[in-house]
Amino acid sequence: MTDPNSLDFTVPDPWGDLPGYALNALSPDERARVEELLEYSPEARDELRRYMEAAENLSKLAPDTVPSARVRRLLLAQVDSDLHLMDIAREDARSVSPSGQSVLSAILKPARVAYAGTAAALISVIAIAAVFAAENSQLNSEVAQLRDDVNTESSEIDELRQSVELMTSQFAAQDAEVARLTALNAAMNEALKDQQWLTYVTQNNQYRIPEILQGGPQMPEAIGTLAVKNFDDPAVLLVSNLPPAPESYQYMLSLVRDGVPSPVASFQVNEAGMARVEFELPDNIVHFESIIVTLESLDGGLESLSGQAVMTAATAP
Amino acid sequence: MAQESIVFQEMDDLELLELISSGDRDALAHLYDRYGRRVFALAARILNDPVSSEEVTQDVFLSVWRRGSSYSAAKGKFTTWLFSIAHNRTIDELRKRRRDRNRQNDDIEDHLHIESAEISPLENAVAQSEYAKVRDAMADLPVEQRQVVELSYFKGLTQAEIAEKTGQPLGTVKTRMRLALKKLRNALSSEISAAV
C-alpha cells in the first residue's frame, strides 16, 4: 500500500498549499493560485487564518532585541513627509472650483502635482537630514564629553605633576637643611675644640684671660674671650654667638690706646657664629685701655676703621 | 504629551489602527513602540543583519501607515496581519539577498544586546514566558515536522526547495507543514491567543 505522504502532488493543489502560504514557502505561481482560491472561498480564508495565527507564534522564537532609535526617527520623518504631501494634495483639490476647472487651473494643475511631488521629496530629504543632523549632534555631544573627560584627566595629571614638583622641592629644602645642620655640627665641634684648647692652655701653659668682650646693643648675645701669655707669645681671641658678617664685610679686632684703635686682626665666624683668632700683641696688653671688634668693609684695609663696634671690653687698669 | 501617551497605552491595537488610518502619526509611533522590537527581532533572527533588519522594520510600519485601512478583523488578529507583513517583507529581503549573493552577512551578536537594557523586566518576563511556550510546542513536534517549519519560516525556503534539500517528495513536505501548523495551533491557541 502506498504511503499517502510520499505522493508528489504534480496537480496544482491550492488548498493543500495553504500551510505553505502561511509560512511564505510558496513559489509565485503557487501563491497566485492560493490567492485565487481565497478570492472565492470563505472556507479557505478561514483555514488560512488559523494557519497564519499558528505561524505568527513562531515569531516569538526570535531572540528579544531592540532596534536602534534611528529606525523610529526615520519612520516618523517619512510619515511627516507623507502628511505634508497629503496637505498639498488637499490644498490642490480645494483650489479647483466645483463647476469645473478654469483654463488656467487646467494648465497649472500638472505643475502643482509636479511641485507637490518635488516638495514632498524635498521635505522627506530634509526630514531625514534632520534625523542625521540630530544623530550628528548627539555624536558631537559625545565627542565634547570625551574631550571634557580628557581635559579633566589632563588637569588631574597637572595637579599630580605639581604635587610631585612640590615634594621634590621639599626634599631639596630638607637636603639643604641637613647640609646646613651638618655644617653647623662641624662648626660646633670646631668651637668645642677651641674651648678645650683654651681650657688646656689656661691650665697648663700659663695663659690668662684678662678680658671678656661683650656684644653691643645690636648683638647682645655675642661674647669674646681674650687669652694672653707673654708679650711675645701670640694672643688668642675666642668668639661665640656672633652672626656671620654680611657679604663683602669682615670683623676687625683692634686694641685702643689713647683713644686711637690699632687693628691687629681681621676674621670671619663660622656657621655657629664662632671664631678663633690668633694675633701678635703690639705691646703688653696692660698698655691698652680697651679692646674693640668692629664690622668693616673688605675694601677698607687695616688702616682705616670706620665700621660700627659690635663687641668691646675695657682692659683692667 | 505624557497624558496623550497614557491614552494611547490604554487603546487596543484596533483603536490605534483606526487612528493611524485617519493620519494620526502619534498613534503609529505608539504602535511602533508596542511591536517594533518584536518585528525587528524577527527580521534579525532571519536575516542575521542588523542594518537590513532595521530597514525591514521601518518598511513594515510604513506599510501599516499607508495600508492600515486594508486590514479587516475578519482576516484574523491584528498581530497576525502585522507579523504576516513583517515575515513577508523579511523573506523577500532574504530571497533577494540569496539572488544577489553580493551582500555580506554581518555578525549580529553584538548588536542584539546593545539596547537590551531598555527592555523592562515585566516585558522581558512576558516575552520569555511566550518564548518558552512556543519553544516547548516546537520541541513537541516530530523532528521532520519541526525541520520543515524551521526551513520555511526562518530560512526562507519554499516547500519545493525543502523537498529538494531533504530529499522528500513535495507532498510529504506539504503534509508535514500542515500537521506542524495544526499541532502548534492546538498547543498554543489556548495559552497565547488570549494574551495577544
Image (cartoon, coloured by chain):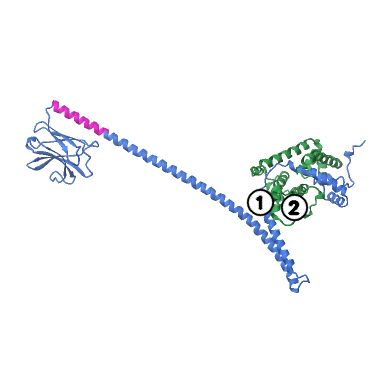
Going by the image, does A124 lie left or right of B137? left
Task: Say what amino acid the circle numbered 2 marks.
Answer: Leu
Q: Looking at this view, is B137 or A286 the one in front?
A: B137
Alpha-carbon distance for marks 2 and 1? 19 Å
* Residue linked to disc 1: B3
Q: Chain of mark 1?
A: B
Chain corresponding to blue in the figure: A
Image quarter where the N terminus of chain A lies is top right
Residue A78, given in percent of the width and then of the height, sits at 69, 56
In the rendered view, tell whether residue A229 sits above or below residue A249: above
Label 2 close to label 1 by CB (< 8 Å): no
In the rendered view, tell whether residue A209 sits above or below residue B31: above
Query: Depth-wise, is mark 2 or mark 1 nearer the camera?
Result: 1
| Callout 1 crowding tier (Cα within 10 Å): few <14, some 14–19, many ≥20 | few
**Residue B158 seen in the current view:** no
| Callout 2 crowding tier (Cα within 10 Å): few <14, some 14–19, many ≥20 | many
Chain corresponding to green in the figure: B
Where on the picture, by quarter, is residue B25? bottom right
